[in-house]
Amino acid sequence: MQNTSFINNNGIKVAGNIHYPGGFDASRKYAAIITVAPAGGAKEQTAGIYAKKMAQRGFVTIAFDASFQGESGGEPRYKEDPIARVEDVRGAVDHLVSLPYVDEKRIGVLGICAGGGYAASAAMTERRIKAVGLSVPVNGGREMRAAGREATIATLGTIAEQRTAEARGAEPMILPWIPDEYKESGDIDLRQAYDYYRTPRGQHPNWQNKSRFVGMDAVLAFDAFYLADMLLTQPLQVIVGSEPGAFGSNRDGHEVYERVGSAQKDLLVFEGASHFDLYDKPEYVDRAVAEFADFYSTHLKSPA
């Protein structure tokens, strides 16, 4: 693994890690995979786990911190900006095609949780991406709007008031991604989110449990699968767990599978698996990686 960075089209320096396959030979050309982290996630967490394991399967891989987060640049800090997240994926493609050992015709993307939504959205117009893998994908805007129209409009009103306050000099409102109350939640996704992010299981010094409240207006208006029927035509592999929870990845995985225009698509449901089992539990992640490796090997083949 090697630290790397690139400047995206927004002029932000994005920090990443490149993982290399065993016996890496810089004189060869490799297929490459971009792993896209969940909302607020760091490159060293589940995106890094998938990147490392996919590299062990023979691919050059890159995981990175989102703009405004982690070790990446961008102001204001702690913002989850869907458009910037998609642009980060484009920037990662730009970076990969500049590397002499990456075959520009064999680049895929693999997104986890909200990163799956961003990966799908990016692939619709980033045609240098030739294959799309989604592990427990979440359409972040759909999740944020789950409380319904009235609650969503009310939240946007609160955001507007807070934005006015901050424009007049108030301190930014920074909320936790994973609040304390998740620890004892009756919902499997919320409870396991606490267990993953806020215990040694998945906690990392580069992960900050901070989200800029006023930036959520962009997420509330975002549909990761908008125009998927027309524009998402690359081969698609979706993997979800059978256990439903608040994040809704089982639902969103089925929805994106149904909506896409891909002629070659597949949906796998891992029985008994929860959303966060597919973040780091070897019995599920290793199985998912094997499926994704076969998928990318098929659709990112070397030219004859």
Image: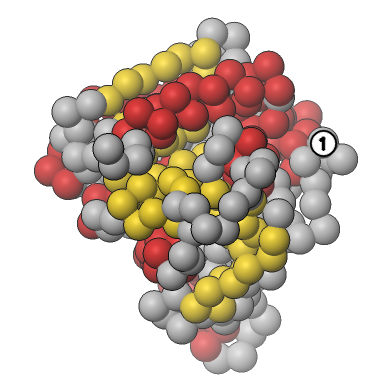
Left or right: 125 in relation to 147: left
Q: Up-down: is 163 above or below 1? A: below
Looking at the rendered image, the quarter that the C terminus falls into is top left
Q: Up-down: is 286 above or below 98? A: above
**Along the viewing direction, whichever of 20 and 208 lies nearer the viewer:** 20
Residue 127 x, y percent position in the rendering: 24, 54
Q: Up-down: is 302 above or below 160? A: above
Residue depicted at x 44% and y 46% = 31
Residue 270 x, y percent position in the rendering: 52, 13
**Along the viewing direction, whichever of 23 and 172 lies nearer the viewer:** 23
Residue 181 position by quadrant: top right
Residue 40 position by quadrant: bottom right
Residue depicted at x 52% and y 88% = 167
Label 1: how many Cα within 10 Å (few below 14, some 14–19, many 20+): few
Let me know if residue 190 appears in the view.
Answer: no
- Residue on which disc 1 sits: 201
Q: Up-down: is 295 above or below 2? A: above
Left or right: 127 in relation to 218: left
Q: Residue furthest top?
A: 271
Q: Amino acid at mark 1?
A: Arg
Q: Residue furthest bottom?
A: 168
Residue depicted at x 59% and y 72% = 5
**Along the viewing direction, whichever of 209 and 284 lies nearer the viewer:** 284
Mark 1, secondary structure of its residue = loop
